[in-house]
């Protein structure tokens, strides 16, 4: 591993994200949609709060006046869905674009190993992802100013989003390394992400043991517990394991596609 | 400096390179010649460690391309055929990026980049975006990135393709200047390029090595006849018959359109003979006019066509 090469490719890659406006457009759309979700959640919360003033039974029945339950947790769920739609757009070009234009061939004629190229690109994309997710901190900050939410679930929730995004990117990196067509890379990565996501729907229809297993490999189940404020090493290991797996698979795909 | 032994490369069931061996010494310029699809680019990709061979060995600067690719890559400069560059970068930033990637010390990067940009004539476009410069400049940037760490070996895949005649001349001049200090392999399907630049030629066709020699020797090898071009003022039919009877002449062909009282002929004769004197005597005897007489040596083009079509 050569830190200098990784740094150079990382800077170049980040430069492309911003000079091609991909980063600006994706970040703007992401904030538009998540902002809209946040506004609606908050609006419905305030409607419920007014209703609760005249009908105290509401609160006792549904725990609806807990701002963490009614706004924060659904907000993390919504943000994660928008992330699922947006990250393939960030990752699809990572390898596919360079393979198509031929610059990958030239890059690999320099004394740099494939893993350095992959790590640099992964980190560059992760940086754009951070730039996308960090402005959303405004929403919980607004809640803290206006209400009295619990802080811990928000912190672990963000940790969850970060790990989830890092996993999405590793999957996108892998699909981008499979092809020289960016559309194919994006389509395959959408498919994989949705499959990992929707797995949890099957839990109800299978045996208990299988259900437990599916619950463990489904992407969103782990976010759920983090968004509740439960910091479990199992969830963190799950995400880190998946990230390593897909970076490893990308490396194998780079080696296998040498022709 | 570069040695290739019994190299074979298969793409699925298609054999792109079929048992090729050659070697070249330091400071030489080797020309890879072959029709499109002959396996030139494949060979270059193997030498630059972009992909492994199916079997056989390739060593560059003493390092095996398969076992020690990073050592090989440290010593080569590669210009791929399509000249793939990052269009969104400025020429200066791009060359600095490449210099860093090739492991130049940070303190040397700036000076090396300035030097190579000057050598390749990039002063005018130095601060421009690569996507906005002309094809000729693009090619020079490609050459500059190959040269930036002053590598021992340069591997250039069709370095003049797609350029206008003026640009071709400039790029050839650049390459010529580089010989001596660098060992250069270049591939091309443009024949004059090879005779202009290369000290050694390897001709490949359909993945097989067809010939390997200096351009001069290849030209001499082509056959056992020599050719004269004669332009003679006299009745064409009569001249043609008379020429055919001169000792040593193997065949006479009209060259171009005959006029009423003059015609050009190309005359093939045995290499051992020199029929010039007899021809002159014949012309003087008949009181014809000798307008032109010159010998035509077989060009590389003839060699190439002969060697490549012989296969079929």
Image (spheres, coloured by chain):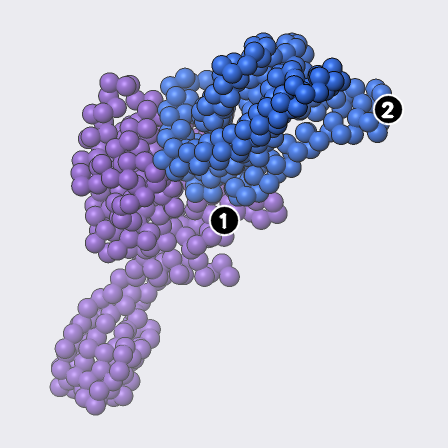
Chain colours: A blue, B purple
User: Pointer 2 indicates a residue of which chain?
Assistant: A
- Residue visible at 30% across and 71% down in the picture: B268
Quadrant of the image occupied by residue A160? top right
Asked whether the viewer can see residue B87, the reply is yes
Instruction: Identify the residue under disc 2.
Output: A207
Residue extending furthest toward the front: A54
- Residue visible at 54% across and 29% down in the picture: A39
Quadrant of the image occupied by residue B184? top left
Residue extending furthest toward the right: A207
- Residue visible at 32% across and 43% down in the picture: B131
Vertical arrangement, residue B30 with respect to residue B147, above or below: below
Q: Badge 2 local density, few (<14 within 10 Å), some, or many (20+)?
A: few
Q: CA distance from mark 1 to mark 2?
A: 59 Å
Element carrying mark 1: loop
Q: Badge 1 local density, few (<14 within 10 Å), some, or many (20+)?
A: many
Vertical arrangement, residue A67 with respect to residue B240, above or below: above
- Percent coordinates x, y for residue A155 in the rendering: 56, 12
Vertical arrangement, residue B287 with respect to residue A162, above or below: below
- Percent coordinates x, y for residue A86 in the rendering: 54, 34
- Residue visible at 66% across and 10% down in the picture: A230
User: Pointer 1 indicates a residue of which chain?
Assistant: B
Instruction: Identify the residue under disc 1.
Output: B207
Q: Nearer the viewer, residue B158 or A201?
A: A201
């Amino acid at each position: 591993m050569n830190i200098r090469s990784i740094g150079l490719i990382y800077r170049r890659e980040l430069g492309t994200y911003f000079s091609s406006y991909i980063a600006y457009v994706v970040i703007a759309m992401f904030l538009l949609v998540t902002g809209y979700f946040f506004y609606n959640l908050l609006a419905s919360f305030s409607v419920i709060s007014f209703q609760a003033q005249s009908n105290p039974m509401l609160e006792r029945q549904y725990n609806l006046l807990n701002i963490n339950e009614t706004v924060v947790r659904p907000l993390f769920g919504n943000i994660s869905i928008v992330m699922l739609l947006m990250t393939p757009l960030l990752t699809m070009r990572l390898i596919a674009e360079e393979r198509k234009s031929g610059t990958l061939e030239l890059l690999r004629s320099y004394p740099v190993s494939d893993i350095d190229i992959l790590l640099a690109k992964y980190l560059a994309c992760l940086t754009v992802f951070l730039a996308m997710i960090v402005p959303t901190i405004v929403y919980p900050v607004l809640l803290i100013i206006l209400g009295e939410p619990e802080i811990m679930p928000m912190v672990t929730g963000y940790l969850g989003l970060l790990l989830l995004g890092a996993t999405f990117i590793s999957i996108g990196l892998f699909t981008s390394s499979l092809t020289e067509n960016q559309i194919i890379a994006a389509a395959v990565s959408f498919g994989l992400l949705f499959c990992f996501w929707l797995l949890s729907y099957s839990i109800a229809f299978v045996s208990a043991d299988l259900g437990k297993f599916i619950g463990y490999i489904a992407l969103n189940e782990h976010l759920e517990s983090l968004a509740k404020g439960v910091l479990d090493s199992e969830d963190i290991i799950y995400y880190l394991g998946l990230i390593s797996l897909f970076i490893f698979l990308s490396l194998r795909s780079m080696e296998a596609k040498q022709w | 400096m570069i040695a290739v032994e019994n190299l074979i490369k298969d793409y699925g069931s298609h054999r792109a390179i079929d048992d090729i061996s050659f070697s070249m010494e330091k400071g030489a310029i080797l020309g890879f010649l072959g029709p499109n699809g002959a396996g030139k680019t494949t060979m270059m990709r193997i030498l630059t460690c972009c992909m492994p061979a199916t079997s056989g060995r390739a060593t560059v600067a003493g390092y095996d391309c398969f076992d020690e690719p990073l050592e090989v890559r440290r010593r080569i400069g590669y210009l791929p055929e399509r000249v793939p560059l990052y269009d969104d970068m400025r020429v200066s930033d791009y060359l600095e990026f490449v210099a860093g990637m090739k492991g130049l010390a940070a303190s040397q990067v700036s000076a090396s980049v300035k030097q190579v940009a000057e050598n390749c004539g990039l002063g005018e476009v130095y601060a421009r975006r690569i996507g906005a410069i002309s094809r000729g400049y693009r090619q020079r940037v490609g050459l500059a990135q190959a040269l930036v760490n002053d590598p021992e070996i340069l591997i250039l895949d069709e370095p003049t393709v797609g350029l206008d005649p003026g640009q071709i001349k400039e790029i050839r001049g650049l390459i010529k200047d580089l010989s001596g200090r660098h060992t250069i392999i270049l591939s091309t399907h443009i024949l004059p390029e090879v005779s202009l630049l290369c000290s050694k030629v390897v001709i490949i066709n359909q993945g097989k090595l067809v010939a390997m020699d200096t351009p001069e020797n290849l030209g001499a090898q082509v056959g056992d006849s020599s050719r004269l071009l004669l332009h003679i003022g006299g009745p064409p039919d009569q001249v043609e018959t008379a020429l055919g009877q001169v000792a040593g002449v193997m065949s006479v062909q009209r060259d171009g359109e005959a006029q009423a009282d003059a015609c050009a002929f190309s005359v093939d004769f045995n290499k051992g003979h020199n029929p010039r004197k007899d021809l002159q005597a014949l012309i003087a005897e008949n009181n014809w006019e000798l307008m032109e007489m010159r010998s035509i040596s077989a060009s590389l083009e003839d060699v190439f066509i002969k060697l490549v079509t012989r296969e079929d």
